[in-house]
Amino acid sequence: MTIPFVDLKTQYQALKPQIHERINRVLEHGQYIMGPEVQELEEKLAAYTGAKHCITVASGTEALLISLMALGIKPGDEVITTPFTFVATAEVIVLLGAKPVFVDIEPDTCNINASKIEEKITSKTKAIMPVSLYGQPADMDEINAIAARNGNIPVIEDAAQSFGAEYKGMKSSNLSTIGCTSFFPSKPLGCYGDGGAIFTNDDLIAQACKEIRVHGQSARYVHTRVGVGGRMDTLQCAIVLAKLERFDWEIEQRIKIGQRYTQMFLSSGASNTLAFAPVKIRPVRTSVYAQYTLICPDRAAIQSKLKQANIPTAIHYPVPLNEQAAYRQLCCPDCTPIASRIAKQVISLPMAPDLTVSQQEAIVACLTQ
Ligand SMILES: Cc1ncc(COP(=O)(O)O)c(C=O)c1O
């Protein structure tokens, strides 16, 4: 049995007529840039999350960059974030000349430890950027409360991995001042290239993001501010629109499959004997399991067992950002010992809405027998 790490082919087969119809429609009308599908997608995603505004952009990275630009982040400013994330989270801060201030993570969820944020706030702190890692929001109530009592610091949720997840019944991307997601193909809601979106309830921020996305234009050839070329292609929007038809079912499946993995591991007792534990999902939150991840002190043993059985795995992420050459001068790894340790212990298993029970049984059996 061949098990893909992420199964985009089965999804494509299931949605083939809708995807082709949507693509053909764009080819017929020919409005490849800012065509009608862009607005249609923005309206549907805003309604889905409950946010007032959705602004589609060229990628998740661009969503983060444009959001920081809309907040006016400039050289010398500080942005609090986690070192245990994909590099884009910190990269965009540094690109603007600001400084990422890394706060350590919780050892069981791998998300930023909210209780350690306040001690890092200074007069230079201009934003807090938690990441909803592996598909589960961080402790957003606590983070929003810290931001509010320290002068209403804007909070940007990096929701690149968590679109569709919930926190106290609210959708990820609509949990703070701004939410940013990614439509990278392997994300829970993916397109067939690059894409992303910004969500906010703030009219001024939304207007700024819209202008920055198109080179800072407030009207044609009127450049009110410095911007970027950050639009999402009409074709990619059309693909996401087609995929939305199956998205609710896919989210249900992801949650079911993630919970089933955990149940299977717990009932086998293997997480005790083999000494690994699934990343913890806190009450009143859901994870959409962009990754299903185990924490295991002896990762090499688990990795080689799965490799021998031809089961693909991945490591998200092997090195915290403050140990990477480009970022280590910003903060020493001693400041974030949990991230340092966890980076050596995580391993992600195959996950897709179309993962079958027998595929899952084979994966679990490999680790528990
Ligand atoms: C946490 C996180 N932030 C940002 C990004 C960047 O998204 P994109 O690849 O769409 O630029 C990703 C995705 O790779 C991510 O996982």
Image (tube, rainbow, N blue to C red):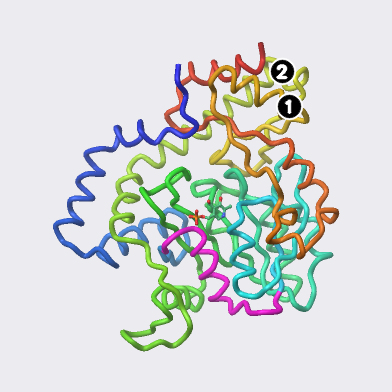
Image: 215 above or below 326: below
Mark positioned earlier in the residue sequence (2 or 1): 2
Residue denoted by label 2: 270
Quadrant location of the C terminus?
top right
Image: 192 above or below 58: above
Residue denoted by label 1: 276
Q: Residues within 10 Å of mark 2 (few under 14, many from 20)?
A: some
Front one among 147 and 181: 181
In the image, residue 346 lies in the stretch drawn in magenta: no
Point out which mark residue 36 bears: none
Percent x, y of residue 220? 31, 84
Magenta part of the chain: 57-77
Front one among 113 and 215: 215
Q: Which residue corresponds to the image point at 50% horizontal and 49% vertical from the top-left?
A: 163
Secondary structure of the residue carrying numbered label 1: loop
Q: Which residue corresponds to the image point at 48% horizontal and 82% vertical from the top-left?
A: 226
Percent x, y of residue 256? 52, 30
Q: Which residue corresponds to the image point at 35% horizontal and 35% vertical from the top-left?
A: 11
Secondary structure of the residue carrying numbered label 2: helix
Amino acid on which the number 2 mark rests in the picture: Ala
Q: In the shown orientation, is residue 261 left or right of residue 41? A: right
**CB of mark 2 within 8 Å of CB of mark 1?**
yes
Q: In the shown orientation, is residue 41 left or right of residue 65? A: left
Quadrant location of the N terminus?
top left
